[in-house]
Structure formats: C-alpha cells, structure tokens
C-alpha cells in the first residue's frame, strides 16, 4: 500500500539508483506519487527503462532514464551534471543500486568481492559526493541509503554483501555529520527479506522462519519508509538506520 498520495514532495527532484525494478522502482513510483519528478539511474534493457519512466509519467510527473554505472566515479559525475542540467536541481538522492555475488568466504573470488563493494558501497559514496555539491549550494537535501539487515547482523555466504551494507551504514553516519549544518539529512533504511526478482529463488528459504511477522516485505513497504525519510516530516531525523524487516533483526 502506498500512503503518499499527496503533494508532499511537489516541485522536488529525486534521483533514484537501481530504479528499473524491485525496491528501486517502487521507490521511484512512491516518490512520484508524493509529487516529485524522478531521475532514474540504472543499467538495464530499454524496455525496463521505458516501463520505469512510464510509472512516473503516468502519475503526472517528469521522469528521465540515465544509463550509469554508479561504481564508476567519472560516469557518476557526468550523469549528475546532466541531471542538474535537465531538471534544474536535485532535492532527493536514494542510493538503492546493489548487487549480490554470494559465496562462502574461502571460495569467494577477488572479483566477486570487489564487484559487490564497488556497486553497493563505492557506488553510494560516488553518488553522495557528486550530488552533495548541488545540495550544499541549495542548503537543503535528503539522502537515503539502502543498507540491509545483513549489514547489521552478517549473513553466512555473504561476506562481501554484508561488508558492503555495513559500510553503507558508516558512510551514512559520517555523511550525516558532514552535511547537517547545510540542512541536508542522511539516513539509511535496512530492509530484511523483500519479495523481488532478486529473491524469487529464496521463496522457501529458512530465512522466512526467522521473521516474527511471518512473511517477506513487499517493495512498497520499503518505499514508504524511504518516502517518509525524504519528506519534510523527517526534517529532524539524520544519521539513523531504520530496519524494515518484520522484526527479523531484533
């Protein structure tokens, strides 16, 4: 259920990474339903990009797709500059882009470790570094990073992913301290098990038995928390990590 059918974010421009599917697409749509125009960053098929853009434009707001590897700083710098040129400003950044390359620690290759760190952690850093310049000039902004309960508790077979998401938490808190004086808040959301294409093979996973509420989350339930943190209602919240996990990591 989307609870933000309002003009709470009217006139604002949101940048959402990894926004062509799953949680990212739900976030883009929820922010648009609250009144924001949305820049969609991803590496995906033209069809997926068009569908994500249509989600936003169908709600009466501007949207554009930008092909960008967030782990590559030069691409990020150029893409953010183009977004500012196209939309005029950036008010919201949601760092959602993420990948997994699971494997036991003794079998995990350098490439699989580096790829996950590069997208999940360095990608978030690259985006914050680029977008913060615009937000600092505006003396306002909302940044929301998507971490994970794996970054809080660890998860066997996911040393790379857990390390990247724990890193996102440290990044969130440090950026919050640096940017607070200019009216920019930085928070993180830590989802638990969410029903997406990336987790469809885990439908019978024993992980579900660890969730007190007894079910996986829907992407929209993560998106609603993100929209709250990006809204004026959360103006006095910064440096926080909020679990949306059905009690999984209590």
Image (cartoon, rainbow, N blue to C red):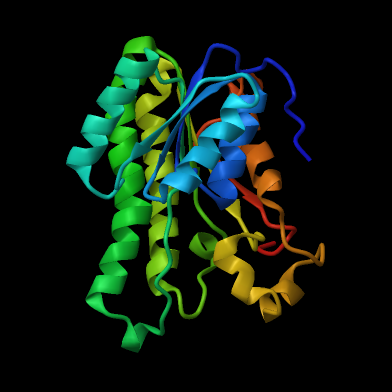
Relative to 146, is 134 above or below? above
Q: Nearer the viewer, residue 128 or 56?
A: 56
Relative to 98, is 39 above or below? above
Can see residue 39?
yes
Is 92 left or right of 122, judged from the image as shown? right
Is 170 left or right of 225, judged from the image as shown? left
Residue 65: x and y in percent read 41, 34
Farthest front residue in view: 47
Farthest left residue in view: 74
Relative to 249, is 181 above or below? above
Q: Give the quarter of the image for residue 77.
A: top left
Residue at image location 50% in from the left, 80% down from the top: 156
Can see residue 18?
no
Farthest right residue in view: 213
Total numbered circles: 0
Q: Nearer the viewer, residue 232 or 195?
A: 195
Q: Nearer the viewer, residue 87 or 230?
A: 87
Q: Quadrant of the C terminus?
A: bottom right
Is 39 left or right of 58, judged from the image as shown? left
Residue at image location 30% in from the left, 28% down from the top: 80
Residue 67: x and y in percent read 33, 41
Residue 138: x and y in percent read 38, 11
Residue at image location 57% in from the left, 60% down from the top: 149
Q: Quadrant of the N terminus?
A: top right
Residue at image location 37% in from the left, 12% down from the top: 88
Q: Give the quarter of the image for residue 237.
A: top right
Relative to 111, is 149 above or below? above
Q: Nearer the viewer, residue 122 or 7?
A: 7
Residue 47: x and y in percent read 48, 46
């Amino acid at each position: 259920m989307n609870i933000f059918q309002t003009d709470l974010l009217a006139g604002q421009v949101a940048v959402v990474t990894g926004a062509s599917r799953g949680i990212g697409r739900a976030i883009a749509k929820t922010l648009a339903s609250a009144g924001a125009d949305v820049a969609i960053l991803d590496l995906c098929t033209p069809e997926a990009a068009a569908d994500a853009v249509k989600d936003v434009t169908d709600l009466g707001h501007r949207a554009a797709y930008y092909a960008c590897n967030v782990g590559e700083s030069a691409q990020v710098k150029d893409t953010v500059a183009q977004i500012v040129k196209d939309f005029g400003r950036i008010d919201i950044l949601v760092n959602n882009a993420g990948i997994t390359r699971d494997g036991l620690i003794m079998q995990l290759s350098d490439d699989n470790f580096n790829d996950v760190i590069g997208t999940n952690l360095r990608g978030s850093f690259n985006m914050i570094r680029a977008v913060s310049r615009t937000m600092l000039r505006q003396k306002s902004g909302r940044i929301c990073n998507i971490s994970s309960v794996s970054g809080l508790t660890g998860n066997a077979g996911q040393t790379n992913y857990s390390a990247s998401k724990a890193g996102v938490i440290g990044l969130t808190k440090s950026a919050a301290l640096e940017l607070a004086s200019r009216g920019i808040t930085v928070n993180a959301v830590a989802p638990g098990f969410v029903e997406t294409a990336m987790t469809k093979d885990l439908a019978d996973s024993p992980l579900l038995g660890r969730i007190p509420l007894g079910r996986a989350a829907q992407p929209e339930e993560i998106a609603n928390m993100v929209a709250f943190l990006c809204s004026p209602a959360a103006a006095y919240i910064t440096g926080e990590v909020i679990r949306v996990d059905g009690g999984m990591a209590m």
